[in-house]
Image: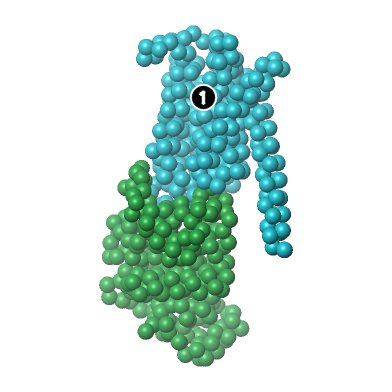
Chain colours: A cyan, B green
Amino acid sequence: MLEDWTVIITACLVAASCSIIGCFLVLRKMAMVGDAISHAVLPGIVIAFMMGGKMGSWYLLVGAAAFGLITTFLIEFFNKKGGVQQDASIGVVFTSLFAIGIILISLYTRNVDLDQECVLYGDLDSVYLELQEPFFGFMIKPTIFQLLVLLLVISTLVIIGFRGLALTTFDPAYAATIGISVMAWHYVLMGAVSISTVISFNSVGAILVVAFLITPAATAYLISSKLIPMILLALLFGVTASFLGYLLAYKINGASSAAIATVLGLQFVVVFILKLFKDKIVLLNRNAGNR
Amino acid sequence: MIIHVENPIVEVHDLTVSYNSKPVLWNVDFTLPVGQMIGIIGPNGAGKSTLLKSLMDLVPTSSGFIKLFNDDLDKVRHKISYVPQRESVDWDFPASVMDVALMGRYKPKNIFGRFTKEDKEIAADCLKRVNMLDYANRQISQLSGGQQQRAFLARALAQQADLYLMDEPFAGVDAATEKSIVDLFLSMKKEGKTILVVHHDLQSAIDYFNWVLLINTRLVASGPVKEVFTTELLQETYGGQLTLLSKIGDLIKEKQFPMREQ
């Protein structure tokens, strides 16, 4: 029973942080930048790991955040200065960095607890096996503690920086003309994505992180007419998918990460179909009204 | 023919802007008077929008300097309102018309703060002025092109600036909306505001503006519309598009400049 709750709480915490920050990625049409960062932080993690950090330590965080920002910078640089299309630029940068990370893993960390499988798919169910450690007098699992801090940081960022993020997302040119640094907000957001990715993917893996970043936000986008409700809806979708996904995994005795990502996809499809029906009904009503 | 003015609100010297080492604006040099409706006129790709953007430091300039209110841009940003082309933003963004108008109240100082009651009243007033108050709670994706443009103008009004830079405000709006926007500009001009508008319809330009910049990468002319709208200068701006030009020539003679100035 405790095992179940540990996994569900872990998934919910990742879901919450990622779906909040993901809303801004989706609205900036940068969803794939989230994907890129979640892969390209790998060399940073491996280098930090080789320098003596252990899985889940704060060293890894710094290494990953650095590579996240390098990724963002390179994508921007090739796109703006080199005239390469943004999607091509993303593809070039993140596959190269990810591959470098994989080479580093296979060369130097052969005998330790870091492998490609773990990075890509994570191991949600193993969080339970972690030993509890004391933080501020509470016995808590380190992963869960880190995720709690992450959620706190992300929520604070979005609450305090709401206007800056919203304005630079909707109309960056206008924001620049009133003296707001569009670049600074861009890097703050990308830094947040990098940190979320690296803290999260130890427990859930790079693929589920990307699913949490993009899918709840995309689902909420379909049916939101204001930004704050969109963020809250994304949060709701992310958290409920964590619950339902875990239940599904339990029933079929499968991997929790995959089950959760599947539920996220199903949520999107259901909302998409409902929206199609609703649009049709609105259209029919309008036509009937005109007659 | 470039006429300079005393105490200009906009002063541009030797401005050159290039994209990928191809010049978009070349050696542009002019001064603009306060309190006028000013048109920036020229063919497609002449650098009209780029000129506005370089005034707001949105594009890197290769050479030259710009003074606004006889000062550096960073010191007078609060006195300037820039309205980008309507297509430059994603109108499917989850925001209401009121949200857009309220963006006019953002300043670097209050970016972490909250809106005051005054901010909200100003935004509502500005929506009323562009006849959009009834749509305040509507999502911007449900607006027509003309309504989107008016939402943008409400945001600009909410900035309470003295100098307005408008990039193609008449693009893709119907005749009635165009008329209402022109009326709005005229009432702003009466309040002493200076309005700089990128425009590409020569016929209506004669009616709308009392000062005109003709550009085609180089600045061809800057001066009162009466003196600038000559067949010769228009020909220099538009190159050899003679049919268009002879029509305009007829138009100029016919209308004999019915100025809106009283």
Local crowd at mark 1 within 10 Å, few (<14), some, or many (≥20)? many
**Residue in the foreground of this view, choosing between A251 and B111:** A251
Residue plotted at (58% across, 39% down): A220
Q: How many marks?
A: 1
Residue A14 visible at all: yes
Residue A116 visible at all: no
Report the side of A68 relative to A278 (left or right): left
Q: Is residue A146 above or below residue B36?
A: above
Q: Is residue B260 above or below residue A102?
A: below
Q: Position of residue A129 (x, y in %)?
A: 55, 9
Q: Position of residue A184 (x, y in %)?
A: 40, 42
Residue plotted at (51% across, 24% down): A13
Q: Is residue B159 above or below residue B110?
A: below
Name the quadrant containing residue A209: top right
Q: Position of residue A101 (x, y in %)?
A: 56, 24
Q: Quadrant of the C terminus of chain B?
A: bottom left
Name the quadrant containing residue B10: bottom left
Report the side of A75 relative to B185 (left or right): right
Mark 1 lies on a secondary structure that is: helix
Residue plotted at (57% across, 30% down): A238
**Residue in the foreground of this view, choosing between A91 and A237:** A237
What amino acid is at disc 1?
Leu
Residue plotted at (41% across, 62% down): B126
**Residue in the foreground of this view, choosing between B62 and A31:** A31
Q: Which residue is denoted by mark 1 in the rendering?
A: A13
Q: Position of residue A87 (x, y in %)?
A: 60, 43
Q: The residue marked by circle 1 belongs to what chain?
A: A
Q: Quadrant of the N terminus of chain B?
A: bottom left
